[in-house]
Amino acid sequence: MKLGDVIKSADFKNEKHVPVIDAPEKVKSGELFKVEVQVGKDIPHPNTVEHHIAWIDLYVHYEGNPNTIHLGRFEFGPSVTEPHVITHIKLDKKGTLIAHSYCNIHGLWESEKEIDVE
């Protein structure tokens, strides 16, 4: 990522750079649940040295909290790995998962998914 990069977002069904977050819409407080994030879910993204997704970052922004918490970064080697990760997290209150993906040519992309916590 370079200073001054603009974060872009779009519908993943029409844009191959958008990270897609698959997670339950509702979870129980303090219980682990699976989160899957991938780039190129419906439209494959190239995976060459010349054009690839370098990393995906995952964050949570809790409702009513001004801070955003970084949950992890997943880095990918071009032509060897695919920009697709599965992790397990737990939340104690309602929040929004935010994923950023970085394409070495087309920059920074973002998507969000709200998670209800009971």
Image (cartoon, rainbow, N blue to C red):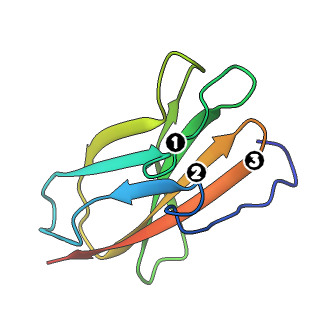
Q: Label 2 is placed on what type of residue?
A: Lys
Are the residues tagged 1 and 2 within 8 Å (C-beta)?
yes
How far apart are the alpha carbons under marks 1 and 2? 6 Å
Could you tell me which residue is drawn at 15 percent across and 60 percent down?
A: 30
How packed mark 1 is, by other alpha carbons closer than 10 Å (few <14, some 14-19, many 20 or more), is: few
Residue occupying the point 23% across, 67% down: 92
x%, y% of residue 62? 40, 73
Mark before the other along the chain sequence, 3 or 2? 2
- Which residue extends farthest bottom? 64
- Relative depth, front residue between 44 and 77: 44
Mark 1, residue position? 44
Q: Is residue 55 left or right of residue 90?
A: right
Task: Identify the image quadrant of residue 87.
Answer: top left
What's under tag 1, amino acid-wise? Pro
Q: Secondary structure at mark 1?
A: loop
Residue drawn at (59%, 47%) of the image = 101
The residue lying toward the viewer, choosing from 32 and 99, is: 99
What residue does disc 3 label?
A: 107
